[in-house]
Image: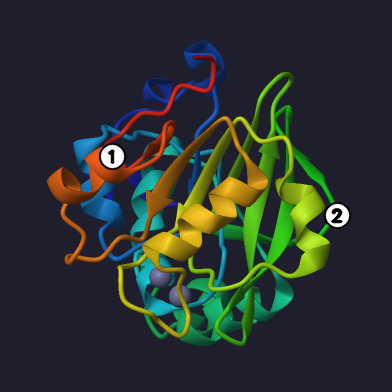
Amino acid sequence: MRYPDPSMTDIPQASAFNPKQAGHRQFIIDTAFELRQQAVSQQLSWIDGVLFTHGHADHIFGLDDLRRFNAVMRTAIDIYAETVVLEQLQKIYPYIFRPHRNINPSFVATLNPYQVTVGVPFDLHGATWTAVRLLHGRLPIVGFRIETADRVLAYCTDVSSIPPESYPLLADLDVLVIDSLRYRHHPTHFTVDQALQQIDHLKPKRAYLTHIAHDIVHADLEPKLPDAVYLPHDGLVVDLEV
Ligand SMILES: [Zn+2]
Ligand SMILES: [Zn+2]
């Protein structure tokens, strides 16, 4: 593994990073275009891993900026995705995944890829994650079921239908985050009505609509949403304990 020479960068000293002292873990799902801006605005100074739902541009084009976390943390970053998505990342970012071929010794992200398989749970620092098959139009992608000791969250973005075999993995949720692009039909995303139908069917204790487009105005839709269904916003903190 290669890290930048500290004398050549403005990176903080290693003592700045101590996740065990901080007492909690931080994961990112997908690396959106605006990862850098979001990380700065949320004062995100370390991450314990990145999980990918699929390889569309709006979910992976912030990946290059993970190198700043390598520099601050002075460690590699574990990334988790289905094999097909890892292959896409390796094609799009050959300079990151095959750095020995780079003409110049550039400072690139240091990432440890791990495959995930739908329906096979894996442990990340005490939380159990399970990839859940979703359909994004005809494209098979994944959402995630995340179980802690006493809470269950599911994150299901970019979905237009849920295969029958996935419903058991979306049962008994404390919190569901679900795609709800806009009011009009879309071939690869749930509409607001379709998302609300899924919420009604799955009956999570709370639900948040995500991937919302600009024709959804918070002030218009929020008063019409059923109880315990919310429109999130950038920087929202969802406390699973309440
Ligand atoms: Zn997508
Ligand atoms: Zn998307």
Residue 83: percent from left, percent from top: 72, 75
> Which label's residue is closer to the chain start, 2 or 1?
1
* Residue 137, image x, y percentages: 55, 84
Circle 2 packing at 10 Å, graded few (<14), some (14-19), many (20+), is few
Q: Secondary structure at mark 1?
A: loop
Q: Is residue 125 above or below residue 9?
A: above
Q: Is mark 2 within 8 Å of ligand 1?
A: no
Please, which colouring scheme is shown?
rainbow
Q: Amino acid at mark 2?
A: Val
Residue at image point 55% right, 48% down: 199
Q: Nearer the viewer, residue 175 or 36?
A: 175
Q: Residue at x 42, y 62 (%)?
A: 193
Task: Give the alpha-carbon distance from disc 2 to disc 1, as whole Å.
Answer: 38 Å
The picture quadrant where one finds residue 210 is bottom left
Choose top left, top right, bottom left or bottom right for residue 40. Answer: top left
Label 1 neighbourhood size at 10 Å, few (<14), some (14-19), many (20+)? some
Looking at the rendered image, the quarter that the N terminus falls into is bottom right
Mark 1: is the Cβ under 8 angstroms from ligand 2? no
Q: Can you tell which quarter of the image residue 135 is in?
A: bottom right
**Residue type highlighted by circle 1:** Ile
Residue 60 shown left or right of residue 125 in the figure: left
Q: Can you identify the residue that label 1 sits on?
A: 11
Of residue 242 and residue 121, the one placed in the foreground of this image is 242
Camera-side residue of 132 and 209? 209
In the picture of the structure, the residue carrying the numbered disc 2 is 120
Give residue 71's mark: none
> Picture coordinates of residue 29 (x, y %)?
50, 52
